Protein backbone atom coordinates (compact mmCIF):
# COMPACT_ATOMS: atom_id res chain seq x y z
CA UNK A 1 0.00 0.00 0.00
CA UNK A 2 1.46 3.34 -1.07
CA UNK A 3 1.34 6.13 1.53
CA UNK A 4 -0.65 9.17 0.50
CA UNK A 5 -0.09 12.80 1.35
CA UNK A 6 -2.94 15.12 2.06
CA UNK A 7 -3.38 17.81 -0.64
CA UNK A 8 -3.07 20.42 2.14
CA UNK A 9 0.38 19.12 3.11
CA UNK A 10 1.85 18.93 -0.39
CA UNK A 11 2.87 22.62 -0.65
CA UNK A 12 4.54 22.42 2.76
CA UNK A 13 6.41 19.24 1.81
CA UNK A 14 7.49 20.79 -1.49
CA UNK A 15 8.77 23.90 0.33
CA UNK A 16 10.67 21.77 2.85
CA UNK A 17 12.24 19.70 0.06
CA UNK A 18 13.33 22.84 -1.80
CA UNK A 19 14.77 24.35 1.39
CA UNK A 20 16.70 21.14 2.12
CA UNK A 21 18.06 21.06 -1.44
CA UNK A 22 19.12 24.71 -1.18
CA UNK A 23 20.95 24.02 2.09
CA UNK A 24 22.78 21.08 0.57
CA UNK A 25 23.84 23.12 -2.47
CA UNK A 26 24.90 26.07 -0.32
CA UNK A 27 26.83 23.92 2.16
CA UNK A 28 30.49 24.85 2.48
CA UNK A 29 33.11 22.60 0.97
CA UNK A 30 33.90 19.57 3.08
CA UNK A 31 37.30 18.87 4.48
CA UNK A 32 39.08 15.64 3.78
CA UNK A 33 41.00 14.45 6.84
CA UNK A 34 44.53 13.54 5.71
CA UNK A 35 46.17 12.73 9.04
CA UNK A 36 46.57 13.59 12.68
CA UNK A 37 49.09 13.48 15.51
CA UNK A 38 48.39 13.32 19.24
CA UNK A 39 49.73 16.19 21.32
CA UNK A 40 48.31 15.43 24.79
CA UNK A 41 47.33 12.05 26.21
CA UNK A 42 43.85 11.92 27.73
CA UNK A 43 42.99 9.03 30.06
CA UNK A 44 39.29 9.28 29.20
CA UNK A 45 38.23 10.20 25.68
CA UNK A 46 40.38 10.93 22.63
CA UNK A 47 43.73 12.68 22.92
CA UNK A 48 44.20 16.33 22.00
CA UNK A 49 45.45 16.38 18.39
CA UNK A 50 46.70 18.38 15.48
CA UNK A 51 44.75 17.39 12.39
CA UNK A 52 45.61 18.01 8.74
CA UNK A 53 42.73 18.51 6.31
CA UNK A 54 42.50 19.23 2.57
CA UNK A 55 39.92 21.58 1.05
CA UNK A 56 39.43 21.85 -2.72
CA UNK A 57 38.48 25.39 -3.75
CA UNK A 58 34.91 25.07 -5.06
CA UNK A 59 35.31 27.84 -7.66
CA UNK A 60 38.92 27.26 -8.70
CA UNK A 61 39.59 23.80 -10.08
CA UNK A 62 43.18 22.67 -9.54
CA UNK A 63 43.73 24.44 -6.18
CA UNK A 64 43.69 22.62 -2.84
CA UNK A 65 44.25 24.18 0.57
CA UNK A 66 45.90 22.12 3.28
CA UNK A 67 45.09 23.23 6.83
CA UNK A 68 46.56 22.02 10.10
CA UNK A 69 44.68 22.92 13.26
CA UNK A 70 44.25 21.92 16.89
CA UNK A 71 41.43 19.54 17.85
CA UNK A 72 40.45 19.20 21.49
CA UNK A 73 40.06 15.74 22.97
CA UNK A 74 38.90 14.43 26.30
CA UNK A 75 35.28 13.76 27.17
CA UNK A 76 34.08 17.17 25.93
CA UNK A 77 35.95 16.67 22.65
CA UNK A 78 34.45 13.22 22.20
CA UNK A 79 30.88 14.55 22.46
CA UNK A 80 31.53 17.71 20.43
CA UNK A 81 31.32 20.22 23.30
CA UNK A 82 34.99 21.26 23.44
CA UNK A 83 36.25 24.51 21.97
CA UNK A 84 39.27 24.02 19.71
CA UNK A 85 42.16 26.48 19.92
CA UNK A 86 42.56 29.25 17.34
CA UNK A 87 45.95 28.05 16.11
CA UNK A 88 45.92 27.01 12.46
CA UNK A 89 48.27 26.97 9.48
CA UNK A 90 47.41 26.96 5.78
CA UNK A 91 49.25 26.05 2.57
CA UNK A 92 47.35 26.18 -0.72
CA UNK A 93 48.87 24.60 -3.81
CA UNK A 94 48.22 24.03 -7.46
CA UNK A 95 47.36 20.33 -7.76
CA UNK A 96 46.25 20.31 -11.39
CA UNK A 97 45.49 22.66 -14.24
CA UNK A 98 43.92 25.80 -12.79
CA UNK A 99 40.46 26.48 -14.20
CA UNK A 100 38.42 29.34 -12.78
CA UNK A 101 34.76 28.35 -13.16
CA UNK A 102 33.29 31.87 -12.93
CA UNK A 103 34.31 35.44 -12.18
CA UNK A 104 35.50 35.61 -8.57
CA UNK A 105 34.65 38.27 -6.00
CA UNK A 106 37.66 40.33 -4.90
CA UNK A 107 37.33 38.68 -1.48
CA UNK A 108 35.21 35.68 -0.50
CA UNK A 109 34.89 33.16 2.34
CA UNK A 110 35.44 29.78 0.72
CA UNK A 111 35.57 27.38 3.67
CA UNK A 112 34.43 27.27 7.27
CA UNK A 113 34.90 24.67 10.01
CA UNK A 114 33.22 24.61 13.41
CA UNK A 115 35.63 24.89 16.36
CA UNK A 116 33.01 24.82 19.12
CA UNK A 117 29.42 23.70 19.46
CA UNK A 118 27.95 27.15 18.84
CA UNK A 119 30.07 30.24 18.55
CA UNK A 120 33.58 29.63 17.20
CA UNK A 121 34.65 28.72 13.67
CA UNK A 122 37.73 28.56 11.48
CA UNK A 123 37.39 30.64 8.30
CA UNK A 124 39.32 30.47 5.05
CA UNK A 125 39.04 33.52 2.81
CA UNK A 126 40.20 33.83 -0.82
CA UNK A 127 41.50 37.23 -1.93
CA UNK A 128 42.14 37.88 -5.62
CA UNK A 129 45.37 39.75 -6.39
CA UNK A 130 44.63 40.53 -10.04
CA UNK A 131 47.75 42.69 -10.44
CA UNK A 132 50.02 39.76 -9.56
CA UNK A 133 47.72 37.12 -11.09
CA UNK A 134 47.58 35.28 -7.78
CA UNK A 135 45.03 33.94 -5.32
CA UNK A 136 45.77 34.65 -1.66
CA UNK A 137 44.18 32.43 0.98
CA UNK A 138 43.99 33.44 4.65
CA UNK A 139 42.83 31.39 7.63
CA UNK A 140 41.66 32.80 10.96
CA UNK A 141 39.13 31.99 13.67
CA UNK A 142 36.16 34.02 14.77
CA UNK A 143 33.71 34.00 17.64
CA UNK A 144 30.29 35.52 18.04
CA UNK A 145 31.72 38.14 20.42
CA UNK A 146 35.47 38.26 19.73
CA UNK A 147 37.69 36.52 17.21
CA UNK A 148 41.41 35.87 17.31
CA UNK A 149 44.13 37.84 15.51
CA UNK A 150 46.02 34.57 14.92
CA UNK A 151 46.10 33.96 11.19
CA UNK A 152 48.06 32.35 8.41
CA UNK A 153 48.25 33.15 4.68
CA UNK A 154 49.42 31.48 1.51
CA UNK A 155 49.29 32.39 -2.18
CA UNK A 156 48.84 30.45 -5.41
CA UNK A 157 50.14 32.03 -8.63
CA UNK A 158 47.66 31.55 -11.47
CA UNK A 159 49.89 32.86 -14.28
CA UNK A 160 47.04 34.40 -16.28
CA UNK A 161 44.36 37.03 -15.87
CA UNK A 162 41.81 36.25 -13.16
CA UNK A 163 38.21 37.23 -13.90
CA UNK A 164 36.94 39.41 -11.04
CA UNK A 165 33.32 40.40 -10.30
Image (tube, helix red, strand yellow):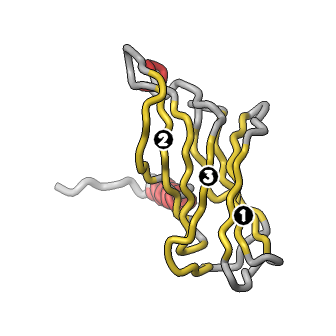
- Label of residue 11 in the image: none
Mark yes or no: residue 8 visible. no
How far apart are the two marked residues, 3 and 2, measured between alpha carbons?
A: 12 Å
How far apart are the two marked residues, 1 and 2, measured between alpha carbons?
A: 22 Å
Query: Which residue is at the far right?
Result: 131
How far apart are the two marked residues, 3 and 1, measured between alpha carbons?
A: 11 Å
- Residue drawn 49% across and 55% down? 54
> Which is nearer the eye, 27 or 86?
86
Query: Which residue is at the far left?
Result: 1
What kind of element bears circle 2?
A: strand
- Label of residue 51 in the image: 2
Mark yes or no: residue 70 visible. yes
User: Which picture quadrant has residue 98?
Assistant: bottom right
User: Which picture quadrant has residue 131?
Assistant: bottom right
N-terminal label among 3 and 2 = 2
- Residue drawn 38% across and 14% down? 43
Which residue is label 1 attached to? 136
Amino acid sequence: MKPTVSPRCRPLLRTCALAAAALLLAAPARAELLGEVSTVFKLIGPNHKIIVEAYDDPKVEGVTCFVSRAKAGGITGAVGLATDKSDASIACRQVGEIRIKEALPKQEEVFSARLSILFKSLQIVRIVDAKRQSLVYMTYSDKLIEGSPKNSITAVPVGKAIPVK
